[in-house]
Image: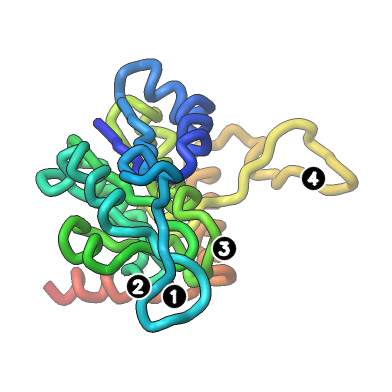
Amino acid sequence: MKIDVLTLFPGLVEAFFSESILGRAVDRGFVSYRAVNIRDFADDKHRTADDAPYGGGAGMVLKPEPLGAALDSVGAEKRRTIYPSPSGRPFTQNVAQELAAEDELVFVCGRYEGVDQRIIDHYVDDELTIGDYVVSSGELSALVIVDAVVRLIDGVITPESLSEESFTDGLLEYPQYTRPEVYKGMRVPEVLLTGHHERIREWRQQQRIEKTRTNRADLLDAVNDENSEEAEE
């Protein structure tokens, strides 16, 4: 997959792609990336990339000319272009799987009060939010999405590791334990020490259901609704 990230702070992006799973994906050739500095496309000596919003209000807005020129430089009009924004539709595991099937992605990282709406109207295919909160850096949101997508590319992570993760089938992941057997008086659940694979599988599935019911009952309702629809068919 080829990924271009348009940003005012390329150092943040480059550091992210150099470590851990993303770094290994790059080294092994599953992913290539570019951190494109939006300021490089500004036409004044101060490399100005933002301006005050029309109509007044606090903060600054990324100007359309340099950002549009940066988008043109990577051929964004012919590629799937994503703008992470609190105003977008929710980014979910299903959306991550959809994006993982793409060969190329472009990310627009907003700052301050965001980007000129005309950029969104002309270039952006997906406006996505990573949650119902606001962060100061579009880079953070973009890289969350990148990480969730890249780890789904065939070969980046073993299929076994992905199959039991949270959201894979609508449920959260079961609790994990490792050595020592006793820590601060708390013991590893006995079933995990039995070596009985079927009992362990059943225990883990029950734990997934209980954890989902406690932390994300909405997900469990969605799973039940889906199962009911399948039964009716």
Report how far apart the C-alphas of labels 1 and 4 lie in the structure: 31 Å
- Residue bearing mark 4: 187
Which mark sits nearer the N-terminus, 2 or 3? 3
Which mark sits nearer the N-terminus, 3 or 4? 4
- Residue bearing mark 3: 211
| Residue 173 drawn at (x, y percent) | 51, 52
Could you say whether the residue bearing mark 3 is in a helix, strand or loop?
helix
C-beta proximity under 8 Å, tags 4 and 2: no
- Residue bearing mark 1: 218
- Residue bearing mark 2: 222
Q: Amino acid at mark 4?
A: Arg
- Residue drawn at (36%, 27%) of the image: 156
Give the mark toward the camera: 3 or 4.
3
Could you say whether the residue bearing mark 4 is in a helix, strand or loop?
strand
**In the rendered image, which quarter contains the C terminus?**
bottom left
C-beta proximity under 8 Å, tags 1 and 2: yes
Q: Amino acid at mark 2?
A: Ala
Question: What residue occupies the far bottom of the structure in this picture?
Answer: 55
C-beta proximity under 8 Å, tags 3 and 1: no
Q: Amino acid at mark 3?
A: Lys
**In the rendered image, which quarter contains the N terminus?**
top left
- Residue drawn at (35%, 41%) of the image: 5
